[in-house]
Image: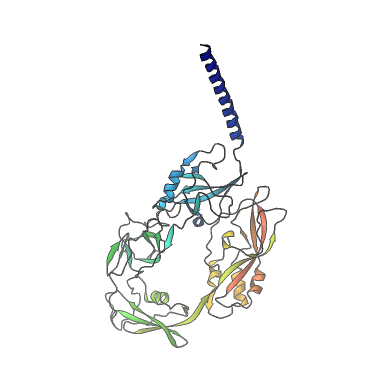
Amino acid sequence: MQKSLKNSLYLGLTVLSLGAVTAISTTASAASKAKVTSDVTLKTAAETRNVEATGTNALYSKPGTVKGAKRVASKATMKKMANSKKSADYFRAYRVAQTNRGTVYYKVVSMDGKYRGYIYGGKSTDSYAGGIQSAETTKTAAMPTKTTGYHLANANKNGLWTAPKNTQYKAKSISLYSANKTDTFTVSKAETKTREGSLYYYVTDNQNSSTAGWIYAGKGYQGASSTTFGGLTVNLAEPAATNDNSVNVVYRNNGSQVGNATFITVAKDAKAGKTVTTDKNTAGDSLADFATKSVPTGYKAAKVDTTNATYGNTLYVDVTAAATSKVSLNVERVDSGSYNVNNPLTTGTLNSSEAAVTLSSSAVALLSGDKGTTISQTTLGSIATGFSTTFEGTKTYQTIDGKDVHYEFTFNPANFKSDNRNATYGDTLKASFVATLKSGAASTTTVDNSWLA
């Protein structure tokens, strides 16, 4: 009995000892939890923040090493999504957090919105690492052999989207309220979804250009005379050209022929010798539209006059060699003021993704002209007026003490004219800016920068 009591006391002391150790261990663990020192919104263009799981880390409600973090998706689930064949299992990164341990966590949301949380992203905010990596959700595909004369096959089943479904976060369907069943569409881009391999075309309504978007295209048009695939049907092949339904368009540069095209109408009353007037082809283009669109690459039409064009005859169009300049952005001076910034901006070429620089459409039009011709100072001045005085940066920087700052860019129009004094059409023009640090996070503005080099 004494032995039994002795054993009971021994066990009791052991349990108490273990409890004390556990309490001490728990307290130490809580005290050693990481703390978030920075958590900011990512400002780069949304489509550049498409990512996919690598399967090495779980997803948490907070950065995983922070107190109170709860698991949203296990490592096994994230590994399954990493190997998924569905675009819905891609993610969009939209915030980045850093801890006092120097670790980085990205806040992400799955393309279908099912999962949202923080995932370990390595030790640097310059690139994705750890549990995620950059993802190319679509790939450029070959254009169809025929790009015009399409109709919507079944809009209720396959409509238009702002992006192929689930390849961009919150890709949404486009209203077809203003489109008629008889409207024809033109294909201008083709892409395949990387994971599923399904083909999409970007189509525009020829009768209403505001109705445009991506549509599922199955295997795509392969050249049959008539077919239905995905969400599209394509018209019968154009009729053979005859004197009664066609006009031969010849393009001339300094008197020499540099190209030709054949306009074929679908007008039933067309006849050799008849003035073309407003007759259309299968794509819905008039002769003037067709002749303008069909100008040989590298040339521009001086004037397209179809007033006296008749079926069975030739329409001559004079063209000139053309070229379009692009613009590169340059930082000529950086004014950091009293801010002490980690990895500050330096002088030299400015990455277009770091500034919401805009150029008016009228100024963009002035970038095109006769190839090799010097751009006049007057034209350079007009292009310069197309820039606003200041632009907000789109990248948030961190000061050494953890504050958000961003750059504001001030344009120098005088330098634009002098820097490009001898430029000719086709050359890359230089636009210089002064960068000044400002308090607060960067702008979220997204702009069209197709005119940039």
Give the image location of residue 134, x and y in percent. Answer: 50, 55
Task: Name the residue at the front extreme.
Answer: 3
Task: Name the residue at the top extreme.
Answer: 1
Quadrant location of the C terminus in the rendered image: bottom right
Which of the 4 quarters of the picture holds residue 303?
A: bottom left
Picture layout, residue 63 above or below residue 347: above
Which of the 4 quarters of the picture holds residue 443?
A: bottom right
The residue at the point 59 percent across, 25 percent down is 20
The residue at the point 59 percent across, 72 percent down is 429
The residue at the point 58 percent across, 52 percent down is 125
Between 167 and 392, the one lying in front of the other is 167
Between 385 and 91, the one lying in front of the other is 91
Instruction: Say left or right for 167 vs 158.
Output: right
Residue 213, can we see it? no
Picture layout, residue 249 above or below residue 280: below
Between 196 and 369, the one lying in front of the other is 196
Which of the 4 quarters of the picture holds residue 222?
A: bottom left
Picture layout, residue 155 above or below residue 25: below
Between 35 and 260, the one lying in front of the other is 35
Give the image location of residue 88, x and y in percent. Answer: 41, 50
The residue at the point 53 percent across, 12 percent down is 2
Q: How is the image coloured?
A: rainbow
Q: How many marks?
A: 0
Task: Name the residue at the right extreme.
Answer: 338
Residue 3, can we see it? yes
Give the image location of residue 160, x and y in percent. Answer: 38, 57
Give the image location of residue 357, x and y in percent. Answer: 58, 62
